[in-house]
């Protein structure tokens, strides 16, 4: 066994360990800020795994987009919605967590079994290595042209929509008549919020 | 910073798409022939409309509310005309196998485009009344349409994923469009979380399919690879992919988002989601199940039978207990999805054409019902079923329209819905799907009960029994901007629902020529015909 | 193992990491009470999918690397979805002053 392959194996073990431990931290740690930073760590480890898989371009994209954009966005969101709130205790929460943990462990066992029992078409063709970026470009302008163009519409729409939803100013009057606008749902202004618990409305079934 | 990145990314890709548009605009070049880009001409019309709406919106809100509606009518009308011109044209895969404009795709794309057109007619007054920007609203709804239309014809996992996400992201934004209302935001958040989780599950299934086929993303190639593999991995991939399809068409047990999203979202958006989004989901189901998993016919048909029975029973029974009109229609739409699934499970010529026919009928009757609900809520500010009591003395148009559409949804004879439903049951019976047909008949009776209850509420009550809302009913006026389109859509849908049943033979012809012009359906029918013999 | 020549790490090792990440994401999705954490869990699930795609792309599709292109699309969409999700969360927070999933109950489940 050569030094190169031993190094790769060690790298893989370290990266996958940080990925898994980091992801557990993301879902388990009580402080959301720690979770967000651990999420950045997970993204970086995954980028390292991509490097092991001969995909330097996607590794760079992963770091730029996930660590540089998504993670920063999440941190901003945490800062914007950071009111200290004590979460009301919910009875049976622990049981629920354990039950869902068991379900997820079962799913994990199933996925592992499938991964190990399936006969993959190995060995495949030799990886292209550093030419990958060229191949990706070729794909984007030949057989994946349609999704590539559609992705531009998706990004444009996400940008416009996010701005519309997140900005504060909305018209306070009806554009045509000048009446004060009712941003609360038009059909809801008669039913005050949170009425459901106190007074159950009559149903169709209870009507004669 | 992240927004900057998005802006940069989208401007780079839009620039690229502009360059591409120029390249394909040259028309007769070798590139255009190879790409066969004419197949997406209807989508290009929608895309241009979207861009023009955004540009017009820059001129201010007054200009937008004046010009956006006619632009949208023109663009969607052009799209429908282009779709009609594509009908029965020679089939060539376009975009190197990413897209296929067979008759099935054209039919479902037409349903999607028509549902957007009618939803937009219903929207204008609502959007203005709520004081939200109109240009952006139209642009986001058109983006959802674009995603749904591409989804109907995509034949490649990557195209399916991107068009699915275009539809989904635009739908989340629309669901949360009334941003000062907590219910709308909450509906949007729930929809987004469940939808993104479903997308992640779909992607996991897609990645397994990619590995299983040794590196193919085209559905046809994967279908060939699946024929030789019978390992548990295919079953897993099937379940993962099916979960997403069931989420899109709101089949039980993947339906939990439906009532909440329908109740919280703006009503015209719900009208689009209940028809356009659902039609795209069914087109996706046909592409994936019939086109890709054909070698696992028995398995997915069994799973879909279970889903259909659960949807019909739960949707129609829970609808009985609802007090909100939108929530009742949400559960009823779950039940309706169950009926449509009967056609898919049959896998015969009649089954598929019944499915297409019922989707078209559902378009008109459901949107007609939504038009009445929107009009009522604009006038009174209520959508409680009890508030409709005694309505016929004050507003005969809503009473008549809503009654006809609900009767049609329930499947009462002279209406359009009756013929659609009877065709579905006939196809199911001919294919020996007795369980499905019996459950369908029983739950239809249940559904007729709750539809008739609403009609009884509106018609039978004495004037003194009328609800406070109806007693204080405002004078009927049509002179506000946006009311005329609403009335036109209402009357159009109701007339087609009422008369379409009697004159439905062109619809039947249309549905069966849809099936005849779709190679994957023909293959499936041929396979199903051979199977019992062999 | 014939793949040892090409890579000292078996394909199944990558698939296992992806499966683990996916299951952790699913658990977080079900159990997180903070809406931001639910969004993070979804990002974990998408990363798991990407590891799967990249592994298959390297081991089974080394010449055409369609999986890498697929992964780039997934990354793009994940960024768009995160931006939209956080915008919706922000507008909900303005209305309700909370990010606790258990208190988003204006609409009954």
Image: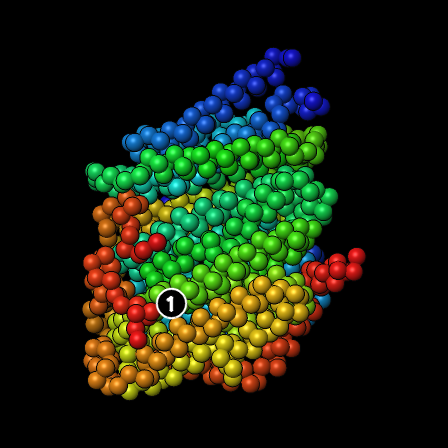
Task: Quadrant for the C terminus of chain C, please.
Answer: bottom left
Residue B384 image position (x, y, % from top left):
29, 70
Image height of B495 relative to B108, above or below:
below
Type of colouring: rainbow
Reading the image, the residue beneath label 1 is B320
Residue B81 image position (x, y, % from top left):
57, 74
Residue found 72% across the figure and 60% down from its top: B528
Residue found 62% across the figure and 67% down from its top: B428
Q: Chain of mark 1?
A: B
Instruction: Mark yes or no: residue A164 visible.
Output: no
Residue B126 image position (x, y, % from top left):
32, 70
Q: Is residue A96 left or right of residue C58?
A: left
Image height of B229 relative to B32, above or below:
above
Residue found 58% across the figure and 53% down from its top: B303
Residue found 39% across the figure and 72% down from its top: B450
Relative depth, front residue between A137 and A2? A2
Quarter residue A136 falls in: top right
SS class, disc 1: loop
Q: Is residue A22 left or right of residue B293?
A: left
How crowded pointer 1 is (Cα within 10 Å; few <14, some 14-19, many 20+) is rated as many
The residue at the far right in this view is: B534
């Amino acid at each position: 066994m050569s030094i190169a392959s031993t190094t790769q194996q060690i790298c893989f073990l370290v990266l996958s360990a940080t990925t898994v431990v980091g992801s557990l931290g993301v879902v388990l740690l009580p402080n959301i800020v720690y979770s967000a930073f651990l999420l950045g760590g997970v993204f970086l480890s995954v980028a390292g795994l991509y490097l092991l898989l001969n995909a330097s371009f996607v590794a760079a994209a992963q770091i730029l987009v996930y660590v540089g954009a998504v993670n920063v966005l999440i941190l901003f969101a945490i800062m914007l919605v950071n009111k200290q709130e004590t979460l009301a205790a919910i009875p049976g929460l622990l049981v629920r967590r354990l039950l869902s943990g068991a379900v997820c462990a079962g799913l994990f066992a199933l996925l592992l079994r499938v991964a190990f029992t399936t006969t993959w078409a190995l060995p495949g063709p030799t990886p292209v290595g550093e030419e990958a970026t060229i191949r990706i470009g070729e794909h984007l302008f030949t057989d994946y042209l349609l999704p590539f163009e559609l992705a531009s519409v998706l990004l444009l729409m996400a940008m416009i929509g996010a701005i519309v939803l997140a900005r504060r100013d909305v018209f306070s009057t009806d554009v045509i008549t000048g009446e004060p606008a009712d941003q609360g749902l038009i059909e809801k202004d008669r039913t005050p919020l949170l009425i459901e618990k106190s007074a159950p409305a009559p149903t169709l079934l209870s009507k004669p | 910073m992240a927004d900057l990145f998005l802006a940069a990314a989208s401007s780079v890709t839009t620039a690229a798409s502009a360059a591409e548009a120029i390249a394909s605009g040259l028309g007769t070049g070798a590139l255009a022939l190879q790409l066969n880009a004419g197949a997406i001409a209807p989508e290009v019309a929608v895309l241009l409309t979207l861009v023009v709406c955004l540009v017009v919106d820059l001129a201010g809100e007054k200009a937008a509310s004046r010009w956006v509606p006619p632009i949208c009518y023109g663009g969607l009308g052009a799209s429908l005309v282009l779709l009609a011109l594509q009908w029965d044209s020679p089939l060539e895969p376009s975009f190197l196998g990413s897209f296929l404009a067979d008759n099935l795709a054209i039919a479902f794309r037409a349903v999607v485009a028509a549902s957007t057109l009618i939803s937009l007619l219903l929207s204008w007054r609502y959007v203005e009344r709520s004081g939200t920007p109109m240009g952006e609203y139209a642009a986001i709804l058109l983006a959802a349409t674009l995603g749904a239309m591409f989804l109907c014809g995509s034949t490649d996992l990557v195209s399916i994923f991107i068009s699915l996400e275009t539809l989904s992201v635009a739908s989340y934004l629309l669901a949360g469009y009334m941003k000062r209302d907590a219910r709308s935001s909450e509906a949007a958040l729930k929809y987004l979380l469940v939808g993104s989780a479903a997308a992640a599950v779909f992607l996991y299934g897609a990645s397994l399919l990619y590995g299983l086929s040794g590196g193919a993303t085209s559905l046809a190639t994967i279908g060939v690879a699946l024929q030789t593999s019978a390992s548990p991995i295919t079953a897993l991939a099937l379940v993962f992919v099916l979960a997403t399809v069931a989420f899109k068409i709101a089949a039980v047990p993947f339906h939990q988002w439906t009532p909440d999203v329908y109740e919280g979202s703006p009503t015209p958006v719900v009208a689009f989601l209940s028809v356009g989004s659902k039609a795209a989901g069914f087109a996706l189901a046909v592409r994936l199940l019939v086109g890709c998993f054909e070698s696992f016919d028995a398995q997915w048909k069994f799973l879909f039978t279970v889903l259909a029975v659960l949807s019909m029973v739960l949707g129609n029974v829970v609808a009985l207990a609802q007090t909100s009109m939108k929530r009742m229609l949400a559960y009823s739409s779950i039940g309706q999805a169950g009926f449509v699934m009967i056609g898919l499970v049959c896998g015969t010529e009649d089954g598929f054409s019944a499915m297409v026919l019922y989707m078209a009928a559902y378009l008109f009757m459901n949107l007609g019902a939504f038009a009445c609900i929107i009009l009522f809520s604009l006038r009174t500010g209520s959508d409680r079923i009890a508030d409709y009591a005694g309505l016929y003395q004050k507003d005969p148009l809503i009473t008549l329209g809503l009654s006809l559409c609900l009767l049609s949804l329930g499947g009462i004879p002279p209406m359009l819905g009756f013929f659609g439903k009877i065709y579905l049951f006939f196809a199911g019976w001919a294919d020996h799907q007795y369980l499905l047909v019996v459950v369908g008949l029983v739950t239809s009776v249940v559904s007729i009960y709750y539809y008739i209850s609403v009609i009884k509420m509106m018609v039978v009550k004495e004037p003194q029994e009328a609800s406070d809302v109806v007693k204080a009913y405002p004078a009927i006026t049509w002179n506000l901007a946006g009311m005329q389109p609403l009335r036109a859509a209402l009357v159009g849908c109701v007339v087609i629902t009422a008369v379409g049943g009697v004159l439905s033979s062109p619809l039947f012809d249309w549905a069966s020529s849809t099936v005849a012009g779709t190679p994957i359906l023909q293959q499936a029918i041929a396979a199903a015909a051979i199977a019992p013999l062999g | 193992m014939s793949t040892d020549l090409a890579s000292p790490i078996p394909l199944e090792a990558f698939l296992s990491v992806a499966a683990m990440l996916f299951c952790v994401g699913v658990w977080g999705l079900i159990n997180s009470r903070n809406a931001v954490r639910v969004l993070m869990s979804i990002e974990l699930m998408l990363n798991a999918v990407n590891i799967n795609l990249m592994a298959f792309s390297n081991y089974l599709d080394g010449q055409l690397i369609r999986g890498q292109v697929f992964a780039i699309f997934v990354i793009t969409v994940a960024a768009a979805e995160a931006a939209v999700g956080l915008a919706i969360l922000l507008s909900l927070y303005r209305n309700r002053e909370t990010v606790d999933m258990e208190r988003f109950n204006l609409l009954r489940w």
